Amino acid sequence: MASKVPQNADNVVNERRLRPIYDRLDNGNNKKALQEADKVLKKHPSNQCARVLKALALLRLGKEDECQSIIDKVRAEVPCEDYTLQAMSICYREIHQPDKISEVYEAASKADPNNEELLTHLFMSYVRLGDYKKQHHTALALYKLVPKNPYYFWAVMSIVMQASQAEDKQAKNVILPLAERMVLKLIKEGKIEAEQEIQLYLMILEMQGKTEEMFEIISGPLAPKLSNVTQRKAKLLLQMKRFDEAAKAYEELIRKERDNWAYYQEYLTAGLNCQTATKCYKFLNETITTTFDDKVRAPQLARLELLKRTSEQKLEIEHCAHICDDMRQYFKQFGNKGCIVGDLKLYLHLLSDADKEELLENIEIDIGVGENDYPTTVDQMQRHIHFEQLKRICGRHHPPRADVEERKNLVKRLSDLYDKGNALCPRETRLATDFCPADSYILLAVHILYQLWYETSDATWLYKAMNILERGLLSSRANFHLKILLIRIYLEAGVTVGANFAYSMLDCKHIQLDSLGHLYAPLLAPLGYLSQASYCLDHAAKFFIANYKDSADHLTYAYKFGSFLKIQEFVELRERLENSIHFAMTTVDKMLLEMSWCDSPMAVTNSLSSMHIQPAEDSIRWDLLRDNRDVDVVVGWEPLPENNEDLRMKLETRECMVRLLAARSLMLRILAAANDADSSSLLARLSGELKKLQSEVIPQLLQKFKRDGKDRVNSVIVPLDAVERLREAYSSEQLSLIAQFADSLANSSCPDSECIEALRTSPCLKPLPLPEQNKPVSYRKFLFRASTCGETLAFLSAICTSAASQIKPNISKKKNKRKNTKEPVVSTAVENQTWVKISQVLTEKLQSLEFILNDLEKLEYCSGLNPEGDILNKRVHKFVYSSLESSCSSLKSRIVNTQKLVNNLKS
């Protein structure tokens, strides 16, 4: 907390009194701060700031009710001193009541309407809330009080933000023209002072599609106040379809800045609309000639881009070299650059199979490394790595070009190349943050090993991949590509402790918890690593919750410093994080995990109460959900797809995430509805939605991931989490069983005989057979089912105990009646018998799960790696042992809690 003490000469004494309280709060010594505040209040009980600081100390000591009581009393006195208001703002922020900050400043501003500082704080409080209308009115009030340009443009920007939230028609016809007139008024009066003010005007015009007016502004008297005018003009000329002028403008820009790729793209767009392709080709050749010795990539890449566009538009170029020759020349010049493969990949589809073979042969000759040779320099090694990556893109690492034996040999060859390459640039000669140039050999080898695992289902390949990646990390600790692949390989094998080790080295922070969270956190609980799952979900949830405060701070600074163009970016970022699918999934998973640990009906009720779940309302805004995953972070060189198919399957995996979220959200709402009295109709509706997901929606979606008759993700570059979790929920029939119980309880006070039979036969309550002992296996499927089994038993136990606890009061009333006692007693006896049967079946299932987990702990693990003498093999072996031990221990602990819950049914 930043200390804020009164600075007026009249308050020097007060400052001296309050300073110790601020110091203690800043140092985190809240008890001492409370004592200091009490000392001041003994002598000056009406001191508002001291009372608020006391409230803040109480809040940080966990006494929120006392804090709330104090600040409510101070608020009723309508404080106007800045230091008191600032302290109250901190209190309200920490108890997550930002709307109260605005109310406090509103009251203070009414009491002192000519106070510029109070109005400024009021404006910023509205910024934090995103109340653009009140922002606008407050900014105009500020401008009337103190006619400064920043305040005026705060009002303009507030109108622009209203437009961004309004419908297109209203924004273009009403709101934006008002903002335009406001700025135009200042332009006519000659009061424009800063570049940001002109940029805001240009943004308003752009939002209305007024391109010509924008061009007039940057060509008029305001142009000297702007930067990058030439670039802006060229872009506007292109938007106005004045292609000839735009092409000339971009030619001039290219001559001044020859390596700016964006200029070449825009030049080709303009040039191909106003002149021949041959003329464009000649200009690019001239540029290449003048920059050839400077190693400038953009003009040569632009020539390939021109050939691509002319091919698509069926245009001809006179005296044009073959694209294969241009690509060979490009590799010759830039083959040691990390971008070379990504550059050439964009244009490989223009080549026939024969051309690809010719290109690869020529590149191999140029590099000078034979099939059994090794690179002798780092430069040659980098070129050879990129050559191998191109070979993979062209299909040489895949069947039918390479069978299993050939790929085994290729993995060995790549491992040898890595060893030789590592010797060329040993760890001692590099900085700790540097990647080893030879690391890409390992990445290629692991891609091949994963491919072999997919095709053969032999987990030996997974364990070999672990060994290779661990070896790479010994030499290159900073290489995040190795860590990401290692996380994936460990999770494929069900080795969660190893995945946790690799993820901790990745050190994901802040927004990476959203963009990279899908790589790891969602699979921990399904694999039985419940304690770490709870920590990771809690850590991610805290980041998302803190995002609102952090983004509000960014917005206030943007207004203070007049960075109007950044305001929309900050708002967009806040909305992206607020509506993140991963945020919604994390929240639901966190709640369900907590529910699965309940050990009594009271714990179920208390947990649901603390979560504030409204089962009748779906709190997820499905139409606003955003997929913020960075799927491209997993490096890959898969063969070029047909029909522009997305090899990473981002849209398909996003749909899996949404359907999985829908299913688990419905499960959570069913748990909450079962705990409420008179929720029969709601349970029926929720169970119907869950059944529809299970029978209609999910099967069609999972069909998209079936390849070669296999129900597995076929590539390491396709995200694993949502697909496998959805497949497990579907194949285990977990959703069907929970929906069946909910539907039964909607129609009667206890589950019917069909539910009891389903308990006995449902696949989700039957653990899979123990994995084989004498060969390497992946434990993922076994752990998935064991975790599903434990989770489902916990949920069913919670649903049943909730339902049973609701009918007990009715039973006691019926027993006390003198008339018609026979029928209710019979009914009660039947109900009791049903609950006893259910508790017996649940207990049997829990015992069965516990027995098989005990057997798994005693299992001899085989990884196919010899742990004797090799530290990396020992590490992998240790991770396998620790993972199974941790998962079994966590799952058995949950079984104990669930059994306690089930025992309530017997009573």
Image: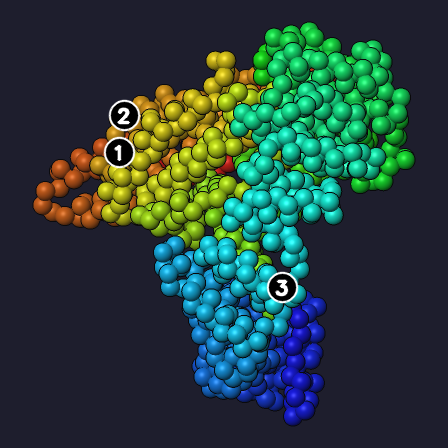
Which residue is identified by label 3? 223
- Identity, as a three-letter code, of the amino acid under mark 1: Ser
Q: Which residue lies furthest to the left in this view?
A: 819
Q: Nearer the viewer, residue 386 or 545?
A: 386
Three-letter amino acid code of the residue under disc 3: Ala
Left or right of residue 370, residue 666 in this image: left
| Residue 598: % across, % down | 45, 43
In the image, residue 385 lies at what x, y percent?
Answer: 76, 23
Ranked by sequence position, the earlier of labels 3 and 2 is 3
- Give the color scheme: rainbow, by chain, secondary structure or one colour: rainbow
Vertical order, 47 against 787 (above or below): below
Q: Earlier in the sequence, mark 1 or mark 2?
A: 1
Which residue appears at 57% of the width and 78% of the height? 148
The relative height of residue 382 versus residue 618 in the rendered view (above or below) is above
Q: Is mark 1 on a helix, strand or loop?
A: helix
Residue occupying image coordinates x 54% and y 77%: 189
Contact between marks 1 and 2 (CB within 8 A): the answer is yes
Mark 3, other Cα within 10 Å: few <14 / some 14–19 / many ≥20: some
* Residue depicted at x 54% and y 47%: 242
Q: Please tell me how crowded label 1 is: few (under 14), some (14-19), or many (20+) other residues with Cα within 10 Å.
A: many
The spot of residue 632 in percent (x, y) is 61, 34
The mark lying in front, picked from 3 and 2, is 3
The answer to whether 233 is drawn above or below residue 38 in the figure is above
Q: Mark 1 points at which residue?
A: 744
Q: How crowded is mark 2: few (under 14 residues within 10 Å), some or many (20 or more)?
A: few
- How far is mark 1 from mark 3, CA to CA? 73 Å
Give the foreground label among 1 and 3. Answer: 3
- Which disc number belongs to residue 754? 2
Query: In terms of depth relative to the viewer, which is nearer, 61 or 558?
Result: 558
